[in-house]
Amino acid sequence: MRPFVLLPGVLLLAACSSGATREPELGPRSSVATATVVAGAGGGSMGMNMVNEAAAVGTAINGTVDATWSALQSVYISLEIPLTFREDAQKRLGNQAHKARRRIGSVPMIRAVDCGGESGMPNAETYDVTLEISSLVTPTPDGKARLQTLVQGSARRPSSGGTGDVRCTSLGGLEKKIAEMVSAILAGK
């Protein structure tokens, strides 16, 4: 009787995998940092893994894929984010290591990312920040476009020459600004 129980499950999996098509997506991306914590004079230590997961923010755009793609490139120029990669066929572009301090174009860094804080001041405001910023344009079933943007990175105290990087997680401000600017271009504003 066991083969009869397995057969419907196998057929269901085959049906699901053969007809399903997934649209391209950015993220989520995970990074793992390991820190060693030393506990006092006894010299005991323990390792601790910290996971940072970043997910793309998707926005429906009232425009075609081609118009959205063109507007997106203009937005990156306006925000002074130089492109380190651009894949026209996939409609994907971005910068894998954009270095910034305090602002990205008109977006204050403290609205873009959270990099922790010291002495009541957010690190994003005072640290040198390096971000991965990437965007992808895909079609929607109604002939319009979906814009996805992924922002993640790290920050380092300017006076520190060491490797004391802290992880930065997106607050959604930059992704929102990019989508608003693309929509404004398409609306002719």
Image (tube, rainbow, N blue to C red):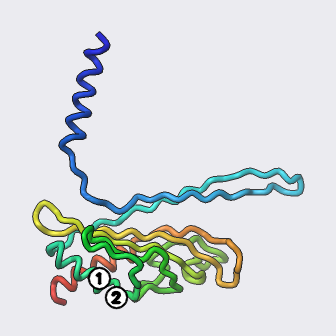
Q: Position of residue 106 (x, y in %)?
A: 40, 88
In which quadrant of the rendered view does residue 173 lie? bottom left
Q: Give the residue displayed 32% in from the left and 79% down from the top.
A: 178
**CA gap, disc 2 to disc 1?**
7 Å
Question: Which of the numbered marks, if any, corresponds to residue 45?
Answer: none
Q: Position of residue 23 (x, y in %)?
A: 24, 57
Q: Position of residue 63 (x, y in %)?
A: 15, 75
The disc labelled 1 sits on which kind of residue?
Gln
The disc labelled 2 sits on which kind of residue?
Ile
Q: Position of residue 183 (x, y in %)?
A: 22, 80
- Estimate how packed mark 1 is, as few (under 14), some (14 to 19) or many (20 or more) residues with alpha carbons within 10 Å: some
- Estimate how packed mark 2 is, as few (under 14), some (14 to 19) or many (20 or more) residues with alpha carbons within 10 Å: few
Q: Is residue 52 above or below residue 103?
A: above
> Is residue 40 toward the left or the right of residue 107 in the image?
right
Q: Give the residue displayed 61% in from the left and 73% down from the top.
A: 117
Task: Write down the residue under mark 2.
Answer: 77
Q: Quadrant of the N terminus?
A: top left
> Is residue 153 toward the left or the right of residue 55 in the image?
right
Q: Secondary structure at mark 1?
A: helix
Task: Write down the residue under mark 1.
Answer: 73
Q: Quadrant of the C terminus?
A: bottom left
Evaluate if marks 2 and 1 touch, with contact meaning CB atoms under 8 Å apart: yes
Q: Give the residue displayed 28% in from the left and 76% down from the top.
A: 179
